[in-house]
Amino acid sequence: MRWACCSRSRRPRASTSSRRSTRSGSSGTAACRSGPASTTRPSRTEAARVSLGGMTQTAIIVGAGLGGLAAARGLEAAGWQVRVLEAAERPRTTGAGIAIASNGLEALDELGVGDEVRDRAVRSMPEGVFTDQGSPLQQGSTFDSSALHALHRSTLLDIVGGGREVETGMRVVGVTDASSGARPSVTIEHGAADPDATDARLERQQRQDRARGIRLGRRLQRALEPGDDPIDRRAERRATKQQVRESRESRFETIEADLVIGADGIDSAVRKALWPKAATDYSGATCWYGVVQAEADSPSGMRQYVGSGAEFGMVPIDGGRVYWWGMAHARMGRTSRDELEAARERFDTWAPEVRDHIAATPQASVMRRDLHWLPTPLKSFHRPGVVLLGDAAHAMLPTFGQGGSLTLEDAATLGILLQDHPLEQALRAYDSERIRRTDRFKQLSHRLARVTTETRSSVLVAARNGAYNLLPTTLAEIAGDWMLHWRSPRAKR
């Protein structure tokens, strides 16, 4: 059952089409139903239900990406009643592919979907590091713990989401914690999921036109009808402001819960509200992503190429496809009308297999985004009754390939701790478990980015390639195995 909104909530008088409930389904294309959001699924483990005064504890999860859906699964297993709010009009499936390392797979096991991921993903071993011309720099991995399970991001979201219902069109514009003694809450704006969307712009224009029409109509009526009193412009302005105020208030709603989870990504509204000084920074690199059908020269495992100020990689994923990415040094905010052509130009002199995979990619499936990260570690991932996970807490660069796996660790850890401890004790334990570990990977990812996208002179490129040649593969695997090792709180009992 949905729990009631707090007394400050305002029920929207506008059309309920702005609030939708969507089941996370294949590629995020499941149909939306207009009207109030449907009820969330009952707990999968009723016996583990956590109660306060006989009432099931409730959580609001902001964001329906990988972190939000994984957190919902973990909390429901701990007996919590969960609502997942998504700002977009439909659950996002941005991204192309994702490679899950051993630690991420262990977290998926804790969340109960590890076997399904193993069945649907492509398991492969890293094939090594190469120069931009295809010459080998470092041999492939041989340790079983180095194996990757790669699949399309939408496939992973389908598995983790498990058909759960997501309340879409719920843009968070305010968050309060429980420091004042009240329950934590989020304030949402209906019908404003994306301020730059065509529908949102049209709606804003219609509201402005209606306001202008009201004023013009009154003036014409009073001017044309004889015997009318003179126009009271002050009264008219007051009436118009009141109409605008009522219209605005009808668009907002405040919802309370026992816990608010910010899983809304690098531009987290939850983090901006309660951690306003935690600002992201541009890394100096941009990245193209694409998915293409496997070719004869496609790799059987993850392959990485490094050149002057750039890095390229590809890995086989489900559906007989290959996911590729290309990172390159670039000024922030630069875009192209044809991002496929921009990627081809940037990697035009690289190895033939790199050029072939880019050229074979459908233009519609090529994406580009500038790479930002959160350089300053947060001293705490929680406030009273509010907690962050995933990119909202520790946004990092993709150079180490651990963003997704660490997000899954966050979700599994939080669910286990909430099952074992009272809320505030669980949140303090979550800080102890996650802050140092995630910051270590974040800083390492940034250093690796400097080695690839920031290394542009021929001398430094030669020195970097020589270091790759000198580093024994076995030593690199041992170090990686030690870093990736993750023990869930359940194993530490």
Image (spheres, helix red, strand yellow):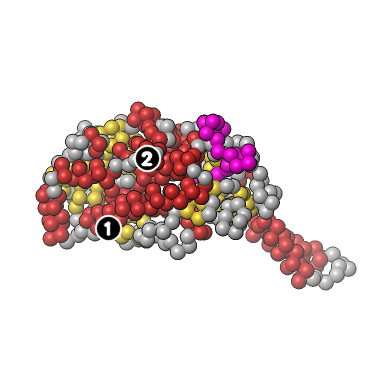
Q: Amino acid at mark 1?
A: His
Q: For the residue carrying disc 2, how many other residues have a C-alpha within 10 Å: few (<14), some (14-19), or many (20+)?
A: few
Quadrant of the rendering where the N terminus is positioned: top right
**Residue found 51% across the figure and 50% down from its top:** 424
Task: Report which quarter residue 457 is drawn in.
Answer: bottom left
**Residue found 48% across the figure and 56% down from its top:** 271
**Residue found 62% across the figure and 39% down from its top:** 55
Task: Report which quarter residue 100 is drawn in.
Answer: top left
Q: Does residue 200 appear to the left or right of 349 in the view shown?
A: right
User: Picture coordinates of residue 99 (x, y %)?
Assistant: 32, 40
Q: Which residue is mark 1?
A: 329
Which residue is nearer to you in this view: 387 or 179? 179
Q: Which residue is mark 2?
A: 492
Magenta part of the protein: which range?
41-65
Which of disc 2 and disc 1 is earlier in sequence?
A: 1
Q: Does residue 173 appear to the left or right of 133 in the view shown?
A: right
Badges 1 and 2: C-beta atoms under 8 Å apart? no
Q: For the residue carrying disc 1, how many other residues have a C-alpha within 10 Å: few (<14), some (14-19), or many (20+)?
A: many
Instruction: Let me know if residue 92 appears in the view.
Output: no
Q: Residue 384 magenta-drawn?
A: no
For mark 2, give the secondary structure: helix
Which residue is nearer to you in this view: 472 or 420? 420
Q: Amino acid at mark 2?
A: Lys
Which residue is nearer to you in this view: 363 or 122? 122
| Number of callouts | 2
Quadrant of the rendering where the C terminus is positioned: top left
User: Picture coordinates of residue 46 (x, y %)?
Assistant: 55, 31
Q: Residue 52 magenta-drawn?
A: yes
For mark 1, give the secondary structure: strand
Q: Does residue 77 appear to the left or right of 479 in the view shown?
A: right
Relative height, residue 252 to residue 36 (above, below): below
Relative height, residue 228 to residue 2 (above, below): below
